Amino acid sequence: MSFDYKVADLGLAEAGRHQIRLAEHEMPGLMSIRNEFAESQPLKGAKIAGSLHMTVQTAVLIETLTALGAEVRWASCNIYSTQDEAAAAIVVGAGTPEDPQGVPVFAWKGETLEEYWDCTEQILTWADDAAPNMILDDGGDATMLVHKGKEWEAAGQVPPTTEEDSEEFTVFKALVRRTLETDPQKWTKVAATIKGVTEETTTGVHRLYQLAEAGELLFPAINVNDAVTKSKFDNKYGTRHSVLDGLNRATDVLVGGKVAVVAGYGDVGKGVSAALAGQGARVVVTEVDPICALQAAMDGFQVTTMEQAATYGDIFVTTTGCYDVITADHMAAMKNKAIVSNIGHFDNEIDMAGLGRTEGITKTEIKPQVHEWTYPDGRSIIVLSEGRLMNLGNATGHPSFVMSNSFANQTIAQIELFGKAEEYVDSDGNPSVTVLPKHLDEKVARLHLDALGVELTELTKAQAEYLGVDVAGPYKPEHYRY
Ligand code: NAI
């Protein structure tokens, strides 16, 4: 079998396979879905373009999708997040490095922005004029490429680059300009074959709702992020683990006693704050939402503004999904050797461009993804992963068990949309953004209980009637917030 792919080194496949094997043991939800649907092959005929951090856990997801009948092409959704051994193992599959027989992956740790967007184009470009019919997205970049590509094809041109465009958007525009020259209908054709997208994260979901509200969503979407077993677990307990992993691998700084400033107290901010507090840091939170600010205060954290905290924090972590949360001015006010990092999806939470423009500043690489920025007065700050998500840039992201919840939701969402995309429309028949039904959310949780030795109480019929629910669930109304 010959197929195209681009990864760092197929020689890493064996190491990757060992890690995948161990991860499978820690991913009971995903593996049980693999068993449940092995015979019925609900994804037979699915051609999935996947854009999600190419880690060991994602490898288990990819092999679950193919075990259910799907064909898959994969890229990472971040230039630093690929685990090269996982990417190699997925390409090699049941073959050897000399004769790979797995899945086309286009991802390696440390891509340039140009390479990143080329890889995203690759997953949407199938051999022999075939096109993908499903997208599995994390952050919405693959979805954006199809939407913007189609929009600009209809306009006959890509809008000129302006000074306001970020470096990333400039590269993105250049890519679409190139595809327009080689095939002026490329994205229009791809858009026509896509049945739907399942989206992994808060930031990507936000983009999808914006498209739907503007009436511009081209195909239905399942919001995987807002499954309770995703955002209340991965975003919270996942980051509670991986934020420390990122900090430790990057700097090995002692967290206890330090002032840790966490921007945002949503699901991720709650996990990050708990982790840092657990290490003995004095956690300070910044928030814009009075409800989340009050939650932070009642969880025992001081809540203040970044203007204040910038001057005395030792460790900074942004978790907002917003932009310019830490500005160049904030960084200029920081203590010597303050550590600045972001765990939100995109790199614009920290104004890296503004930092680079600071007069007289110099940048020293301590090691890959750890940089010291020194001001003319000799003070310096340490920036992790160039402002990109540090738990995946400096470490290996969330551990398998929590990702088993997220990816069980992803797999169920792919099955749902591939099988009945036509049902995922609003009352006017337009493509909609939908959260998975609660009984499936409860199913995902159920699949993880045995592994943790949980003994679940069962409602009696009389108790169920008293509560007005079914003995088998769902147990909560839609408006319940967990
Ligand atoms: P969320 O919406 O629950 O929380 C974000 C919080 O930030 C909100 O409470 C909001 O009020 C606050 N906020 C917004 N702008 C702010 C500002 N300028 N200053 C202070 N606070 C501000 O979102 P969630 O689920 O916590 O996700 C946050 C980000 O993390 C998203 O970009 C998401 O995609 C990403 N994410 C990253 C993961 C990782 O492994 N690195 C895992 C899961 C999510």
Image (cartoon, rainbow, N blue to C red):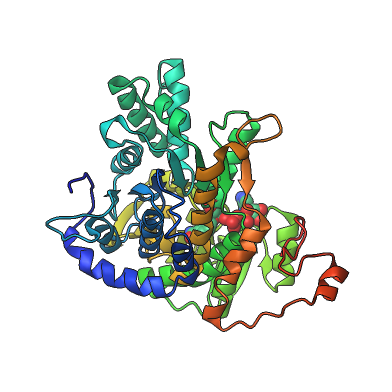
- How many numbered circles does the render carry? 0
Determine the residue positioned at 60% across, 34% down. 431
Q: In which of the image's four quarters is ligand 1 placed?
A: bottom right
| 436 horizontally vs 154: left or right | right
**Quadrant (top left/top right/bottom left/bottom right) for the C terminus:** bottom right
Determine the residue positioned at 63% across, 31% down. 430
Determine the residue positioned at 42% across, 72% down. 245
Q: Is residue 375 visible?
A: no
From the top left corner, tell me how far across and down residue 138 is, in percent. Answer: 47, 49
Q: Nearer the viewer, residue 135 or 143?
A: 135
Q: Nearer the viewer, residue 126 or 471?
A: 471
Q: Is residue 444 above or below residue 126?
A: below
From the top left corner, tell me how far across and down residue 148 is, in percent. Answer: 46, 29
Q: Nearer the viewer, residue 245 or 452?
A: 452
Q: Is residue 440 visible?
A: yes
From the top left corner, tell me how far across and down residue 157 is, in percent. Answer: 40, 18
Which residue is at the far front? 39
Determine the residue positioned at 81% across, 74% down. 461
